[in-house]
Image (cartoon, rainbow, N blue to C red):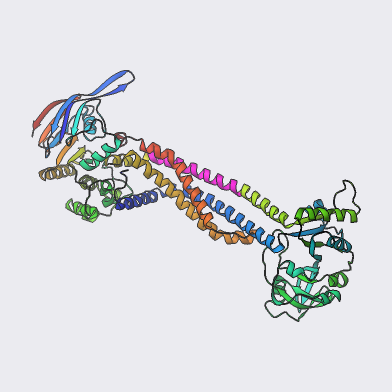
Amino acid sequence: MIVLTDIRKSYFVGDRELPILKGINLTVARGEFVVLMGVSGSGKTTLMNIIGLLDKQTEGRYVFADTNVDGLDDESLADMRNSHIGFVFQQFFLLPYLDAIENVLIPIVYSRKDIKHPRDKAKGLLGRFGLEHRIHNKPSQLSGGEQQRVAIVRALVNDPDLILADEPTGALDSKTGGEIMDLFRMLNDEGKTIIVVTHDPKLATFGRRLVRIEDGAISEDRAT
Amino acid sequence: MALFRKIGQLREFVEEVLKILYYYRGRVIFSFSGVALGILSICIIITTIDGANKKAQVIFETLGPNAIMVFGGSERQRAARVRVSTIRVNDADLIARVEGVYDIMKVFSARNVMMRYRDRNWQTQAIGSTTNYFESFSWGFQAGSPFTTDDYDRAEAVCVIGAKVYEELFRGEPALGKTILVGKLPTRVIGVLEERGGSVGGPHVDDRVIMPLTTVTARIVNERRYLSLVRLKTNRDLDSTIEDIRATLRASHGLKGNLDDDFTIRSSKDILAFVTVISGSLLLFLGTASIVALVVSGFVLANLFYLTIQERKKDIGIRRAYGATRKGILLSFLFESILITFIGGIAGISLSVILGGTFEKLFDIPMMFSFKVVFFALLFSFLTGLLSGLRPALRASRIEPIEAIRG
């Protein structure tokens, strides 16, 4: 699914090179549930952006879903993101002028896949996540946990291969956060590949594999 | 082009933009009203100019393309609305002998004459003319007939009344054969003219009473020497006929060297030219106003848009993460601004249709709504949306997804 080979990323401040990632080698197979752990400034967010095709590495090779994505242009990357990745963010990022189901349907608007009856599918998924009575509510009328569940349904609606979650519990209390992590666990049991990026040590054991990033390099990689 | 892969996606896209506009309605309403006002004035310009031209065309055709009119008083006196009688009855006979001249019509109009029928009074002009008056103006009758050569020769007290006078004195009752007082002269009504409506800057065309010239000059006012107007047609070239008439009148009035004419000659061409000048100044004033309105609303739109982009960074980021291309973002922002101005444009057109009637009554200029008006109005609103949306849309499309999401 994901093969990162000697990935390096540097930012340049004037003449000074500021290395963020210092040679990452990481392979994630289909069906894995990886927790990518690191303190802020460790480079974990940069790594997530590269994995999510939102940013490009300075050096190294990245093969995603059997495609070398290093030379792809804007349009092809947008297509890759749309068909393969579902994003979940700390701040949910639901659009305030759309109701729950319309937010869920955003990836469909840009989709190349032939999804049959997307509206019914979205409804079904919302129901599965306990949101059937919230379908036509605006984000401002939903609780934090509900908003994050809507965001997860949005990540799922276009049948992606990978769910990429950036601090998905960061804006939630620990009980609700635990529920969200249980949802990821459930999705993983159904075969979805999941990567959760976090700084929160409490989440370390929710996944099946823990990868720890320290100072731009992998310091620990073990099954949990 | 991978923006819309299915028709359904296009529909969702349009629905989404409408929701965005509704969400930001507070800001949208400003740019929207500006565009509506700009388009409103563009509509009024075009319809009014079309109406004025149409009217000029009607006047031109009514007078006949070969019509010439001779008035008393110099150009300058006429411009100052000073009325001077300088055209004598025998001048008309001299003009009649100019080569090519036919269908000569003499007019003397007595102003502010009181008409009375029973207890109703109406002050208007009594126009004395020759029997060809009605035919020359191709003016039809809703009742009765014109006066005859016999009436003319005997200075009979008969009259034909205009539609406005008929309305004021008779209020829809039959008028033929009834006697009205024209000044102090009891006069029999023998005809009622068809309504013609409107006028450019003068008295209402339907507000007149027409009688034999002889009756007016001998029995209503005592004025046997002068005429107010001689109207004629020519079967020669207009300009050379005018030159000959001018030379004849200058000789008859004893005007030598570089003394100014004491009369004015107008052809139907001059009337067309006059209306063109009116249309031109209208275009200048209203045109400037509407362009200013459009430019200002365009700037307002561009700036409000620019402000919202900061606020909508996350919106852009999430769309980019979920597969929107730069081009897609660019187009959706452009579409948004064009939609605002387009709806503004449609509102402007509708307003102009509603206000058009009022405007028409106020300035007495007919308005002509046409496909052209709608086309230009929509074109201008489209361009305003495109031009003011371009810069903000480009900026939005250049936002990187990570920058937006981190923001």
Foreground residue among B11 and B262: B262
On screen, residue B346 versus residue A98, left or right, reads right
Which portion, as a residue range, is magenta? B286-309
Residue A97 forms part of the magenta stretch: no
SS majority, magenta: helix
Identified at 32% across, 18% down, the residue is A15
Identified at 40% across, 46% down, the residue is B335
**Percent x, y of residue A198:** 19, 34
- Count of labels shown? 0
**Percent x, y of residue A6:** 18, 25
On screen, residue B138 versus residue B366, left or right, reads right
Task: State the residue lying farthest toward the top.
Answer: A15
Q: Can residue B385 be seen in this view?
A: yes
On screen, residue B139 versus residue A170, left or right, reads right
Assign the N terminus of chain B to one quadrant of the image: top left
Identified at 25% across, 25% down, the residue is A58
Assign the C terminus of chain B to one quadrant of the image: top left
On screen, residue A141 versus residue B289, left or right, reads left
Identified at 53% across, 55% down, the residue is B372
- Based on the displayed image, in which of its 4 quarters is residue B221 positioned? bottom right
Foreground residue among B324 and A103: B324
